[in-house]
Amino acid sequence: MTDYRAIRGMVDILPDTSAAWQRVERVASAVLHSYGYSEIRLPIIESTHLFARSIGEVTDIVEKEMYTFTDRSDNSLSLRPEGTAGCVRAAVQHNLIATPQKLWYTGPMFRYERPQKGRQRQFHQLGVEAFGVSTPDLDAELLLLCRALWQQLGVADALTLELNSIGSPEARANYRQALVTYLSPHREQLDADSQRRLETNPLRILDSKDPHTQALLAEAPVMVDYLDDDARADFQQLQALLDAAGQPYRINHRLVRGLDYYNKTVFEWTTSALGAQGTVCGGGRYDGLVAQFGGKDTPGAGFAIGLERLVLLLQSLAEEPPATADVYVVTADEAAQRHALPRIESLRRAMPQLRIQCHLGGGSFKSQFKRADKSGAAVALIYGASEVAAQQVTLKPLRQGTGVDQQTLSDADLCGSLQQALSINSQD
Ligand code: HAM
């Protein structure tokens, strides 16, 4: 039998959630604007080698998670698993990095991972990339931009900032060697993945969730002792800037990130409210990436927010499901409907910011009020027989905290009373 269900890991965003997505997108685009970032829109498909070279040949993403295929001209292409590689490619290709550049993008990304809550095969990121500044004031500004977004969305208290520095490539190579020297005699005690990584990508062992491996890591050398002077000074300056801005953070010596292009500062914003997939945002510096893509040696830093996880966090903190209307219009019969219709059309033109739902499909007042209540509307407008006869309308508050009492009004007074009723009740 044909299966008409969505492909595993590809998720429909349904109407009861799209309002939360729109809110995130609206607030994020305003915050990004206020920090001077411009939007860039990028292709979903790029050459496979673009990802392999930048993210790293021996990362999980490139080794086992990319959707890779050959096109009709025999080119190996991949659905983008993340946005940084494509953004840097575009910045180099269009010479956007001649002057400092602050860019953002959003859209679907694809990784063949095992789906679970907060982890999908098609998911969405909102990413930010800044080019041309090598000093840690940029890193601090990126983190404060995130904080501004969390604050405006009301999720700041649920998120913790974790920071680490992974230094220069040379410092990292020294540390990698020290880690391998420490772990090699205990090889047999490591989980299977970590045994493999001991040869291919030893720093990723620090991410292992296996309790035996974790116990071994408790005594392992830490990156901070191997940092070069430059990275150490930058990391201290970043911490001083965050202290001055009142942004708390936790230094996590095991934070290495799953992509190879980073150097110096790396960070993640995590929450305990979402279970295992608690990283809502991750990023850091990638000072070598532009040159790697053939551009003039230009520093860069950025982050990406996992939008599914951010929306899940918003929903986990919301007390009530979001309203689908501000005003719900109830009518007694067909005559009342004919009376109400042109008036509601004028009201929509006069107050376009309001979501006005007219009850459709008839039914008793009781059933119409049930629907009004379910819609989450703050007020109902009632056109009964007496209102129609007197050319009036009754405004009935449906929620506690609405700024007016029930009242019967002339058409002329409706806008003013609605404004009074709804501005006091407005959430944003
Ligand atoms: P990333 O840590 O791989 O970094 O992904 C960033 C965020 O995307 C994660 O913290 C998570 O919230 C979300 N995410 C990743 N995979 C999934 C998935 N399978 N399902 C749902 N959400 C997911 C990057 O992608 C870098 N490009 C970030 C960056 C930008 N660094 C510098 N600039």
Image (cartoon, rainbow, N blue to C red):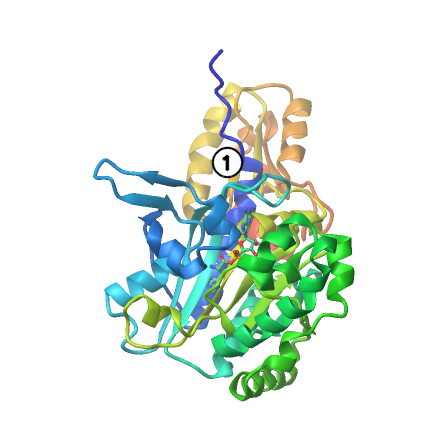
Report the residue that reaches farthest toward the left.
73
Q: In percent of the image, x 50 and y 36: which residue is there?
A: 10
Is residue 109 among the parts visible in the rendering? yes
Q: Position of residue 414 (x, y in %)?
A: 54, 46
- In this view of the protein, which residue sits in the foreground, 281 or 411? 281
* 298 to the left or right of 247: left
Q: Is residue 106 above or below residue 177?
A: above
Report the residue that reaches farthest toward the front.
185
Report the residue that reaches farthest toward the top.
1
Q: In percent of the image, x 56 and y 76: which residue is there?
A: 174
Q: Is residue 246 above or below residue 283?
A: below
* 169 to the left or right of 371: left
- In this view of the protein, which residue sits in the foreground, 349 or 175? 175
Q: In percent of the image, x 44 and y 53: which residue is there?
A: 82
Which image quadrant: the C terminus? bottom right
Helix, strand or loop under label 1: loop
Name the residue that disc number 1 marks.
10
Q: Position of residue 354 (x, y in %)?
A: 51, 46
Figure quadrant of residue 239? bottom right
Within 10 Å of the Cα at label 1, are there few (<14), some (14-19), or many (20+) other Cα atoms? some
